[in-house]
């Protein structure tokens, strides 16, 4: 992603005057007025003002990044404004405001605006570069300076220096379940480690917005080894016959150099298709299981997020304007999306294991889990839920793979009959029998008992649950424990347990927010690089991206981990205690307008962040210069 691609000279104004932050933002809106990608200036201005009212646009270092997703925007675009004299306003570090960069994002832009926010925050950490931008003579010079800096920072922009193995070429693929932080952190770690070794590498990222820097057939054929650092299924058939190093995205973030060492050793196994080379040990088998599960989760999450957001907006509309056709429509569509989560989860787990033939039995198994079908009367059916869908997905994938293995022993003339009739029929019959006769009856009763127990949880036990889930969100920064807590929150959300989701969200926001606050309160405890990353870390924190804490945790895992877990546990505890409710599974502070007791949620965040920062100040020692 290049910031320069979204910034045009006609949307840059230099050395302007403003008497308030709102006035400066209005000037930015005026710069975009008339561009072909802004269809309604008044609507966009209202959306920007609504986001501005939530706060958090001033990120320090004299910089503010106002932003909004709006139906009035067709394509992502930026506008920039420098101020002379600087504007005194409420900023995290007390410095007056000298430069603003506005992000105008389409309403359907997924998390693209979050990526741009993080990219901008990183780009403007360099105070010398910011000074150079403010001194630009013309808007064209401003845009060119941004483009030049990005070209300088791009590891692929120039040839890497020669190595002991001239011409050695590596490729990599990164992906995580949500397609957000770990995907790009892993790519960055691999690029930096390769640059340090003087090795040319190209990294394909499979993010939430799609595939970036996709590997071509020519590049794959000429490469010596491919590093596949993923936590969900990606296209592997293209790598048949090539040496492949397989790892998780977290492994790449923690120790990219070790993966490069395996890749250049010449001892990486040759990929023969399927996943046979990845199950040589229990650890590899566990990673295989986790990858299939996360493939299902990553496809399920959009249904949960979109459905939850629709229900949240519906509640807000009913609260403001009363019940009507619009709110009823949003409620019905939101509920329908949430009902699709289990069929989609099971279908894509099965698809990850055995490709397209397993999709249908996986989808049907997930549907049977959702409905809770048994041989008893329909009134007694109880959904086997998340666990039932997982069992259905793995069962469908494994039975199809077994059928494919048996099919190899049959004459080739029967292939069409077997693949077109026998495999679909037999796999559906097996999965149907398994769910209706074996899985749904006991798991349905278990889920009903669990729901009743959760509903009856009051006082201390519910507070302990909030603290436990909050602490789990900070345990491994987007890893399996974090995902387990998050899935628990989304399942509670489906059962209208909004306070549980609030505890989970608060717990996930604390690590980056607490670390950023610690950098501000105890600057001598952190490196210069860590202090410079505060704006980016704050943005990731308020956006509910726990992985913003990863760079800090990798440098000092014990102290940062302990402080983050305790701060997150406190935030989860307080979110339950104060009766906060979060009706959507993602969004961070952007969900404040639809939350139950938003002030209590802010208080929970403040308390958790302060505890994390205070513990960091106590546990960490001054960094030696």
Image (cartoon, rainbow, N blue to C red):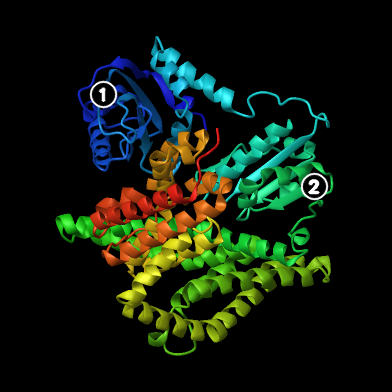
Residue 621 appears in the figure: yes
Q: Is residue 248 above or below residue 533?
A: below
Disc number for residue 246: none
Pick the front one: 406 or 148:
148
SS of the residue under disc 1: strand
* x, y percent for residue 347: 56, 65
- Depth-wise, is mark 2 or mark 1 nearer the camera? 1
Pick the front one: 485 or 73:
485
Q: Report crowding for label 2: few under 14, some 14 to 19, many 20 or more residues within 10 A (C-alpha).
A: many
Q: Is residue 439 above or below residue 137?
A: below
Residue to which mark 1 is pinned: 87
Pick the front one: 215 or 182:
182
Disc number for residue 243: 2
Left or right: residue 547 versus residue 168 is left
Left or right: residue 538 versus residue 176 is left
Say whether disc 2 or disc 1 marks the residue closer to the N-terminus. 1
* Residue 93 location, quadrant: top left
């Amino acid at each position: 992603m290049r910031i320069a691609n979204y910034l045009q000279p006609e949307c840059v104004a230099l050395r302007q005057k403003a008497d308030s932050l709102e006035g400066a933002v209005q000037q930015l809106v005026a710069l975009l007025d008339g561009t072909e990608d802004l269809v309604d200036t008044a609507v966009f201005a209202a959306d920007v003002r609504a986001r501005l009212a939530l706060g958090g646009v001033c990120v320090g270092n004299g910089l503010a990044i106002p932003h909004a997703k709006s139906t009035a925007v067709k394509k992502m675009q930026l506008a920039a404004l420098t101020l002379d004299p600087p504007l005194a306003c409420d900023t995290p570090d007390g410095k007056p405001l000298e430069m603003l960069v506005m992000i105008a994002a389409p309403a359907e832009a997924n998390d693209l605006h979050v990526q741009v926010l993080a990219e901008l925050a990183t780009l403007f950490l360099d105070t010398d570069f910011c000074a150079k931008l403010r001194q630009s003579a013309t808007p064209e010079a401003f845009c060119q300076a941004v483009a030049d800096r990005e070209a300088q920072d791009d590891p692929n922009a120039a040839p890497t220096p020669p190595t002991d193995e001239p011409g050695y070429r590596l490729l990599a693929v990164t992906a995580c379940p949500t397609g957000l932080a770990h995907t790009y952190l892993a790519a960055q770690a691999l690029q930096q480690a390769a640059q340090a070794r003087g090795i040319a590498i190209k990294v394909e990222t499979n993010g939430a917005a799609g595939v970036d820097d996709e590997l071509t057939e020519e590049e794959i054929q000429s490469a010596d080894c491919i590093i596949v650092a993923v936590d969900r299924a990606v296209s592997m058939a293209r790598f048949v016959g090539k040496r492949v190093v397989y790892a998780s995205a977290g492994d790449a973030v923690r120790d990219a150099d070790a993966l490069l060492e395996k890749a250049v050793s010449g001892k990486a196994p040759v990929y023969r298709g399927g996943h046979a080379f990845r199950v040589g040990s229990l650890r590899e088998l566990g990673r295989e299981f986790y990858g299939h599960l996360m493939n299902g989760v990553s496809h399920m999450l959009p249904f949960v997020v979109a459905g939850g957001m629709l229900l949240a907006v519906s509640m807000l509309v009913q609260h403001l304007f009363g019940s009507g056709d619009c709110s009823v429509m949003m409620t019905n569509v939101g509920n329908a999306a949430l009902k699709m989560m289990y069929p989609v989860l099971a279908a894509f787990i099965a698809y990850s294991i055995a490709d397209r033939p397993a999709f249908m039995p996986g989808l049907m198994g997930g549907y049977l889990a959702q409905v809770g079908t048994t041989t008893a009367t329909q009134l007694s059916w109880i959904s086997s839920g998340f666990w039932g869908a997982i069992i259905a997905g793995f069962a469908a994938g494994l039975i199809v793979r077994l059928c494919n293995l048996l099919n190899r022993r049959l004459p080739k003339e029967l292939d069409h009959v077997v693949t077109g009739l026998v495999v679909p029929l037999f796999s559906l019959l097996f999965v149907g029998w398994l769910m209706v006769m074996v899985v749904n009856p006991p798991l349905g009763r278990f889920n009903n008992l669990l729901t009743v127990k959760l509903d009856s949880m009051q006082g201390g036990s519910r507070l302990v649950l909030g603290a436990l889930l909050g602490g789990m969100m900070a345990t491994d920064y987007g890893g399996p424990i974090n995902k387990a807590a998050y899935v628990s929150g989304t399942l509670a959300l489906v059962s209208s347990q909004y306070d549980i989701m609030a505890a989970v969200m608060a717990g996930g926001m604390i690590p980056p927010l607490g670390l950023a606050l610690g950098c501000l309160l105890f600057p001598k405890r952190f490196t210069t690089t860590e202090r410079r990353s505060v704006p980016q870390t704050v943005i990731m924190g308020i956006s509910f991206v726990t992985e913003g804490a990863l760079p800090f945790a990798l440098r000092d895992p014990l102290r940062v981990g302990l402080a983050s877990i305790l701060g997150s546990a406190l935030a989860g505890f307080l979110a339950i205690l104060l009766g906060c409710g979060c009706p959507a599974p993602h969004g961070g502070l952007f969900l404040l307008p639809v939350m139950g007791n938003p002030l209590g949620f802010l208080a929970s965040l403040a308390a958790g962040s302060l505890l994390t920062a205070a513990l960091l100040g106590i546990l960490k020692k001054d960094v030696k210069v």
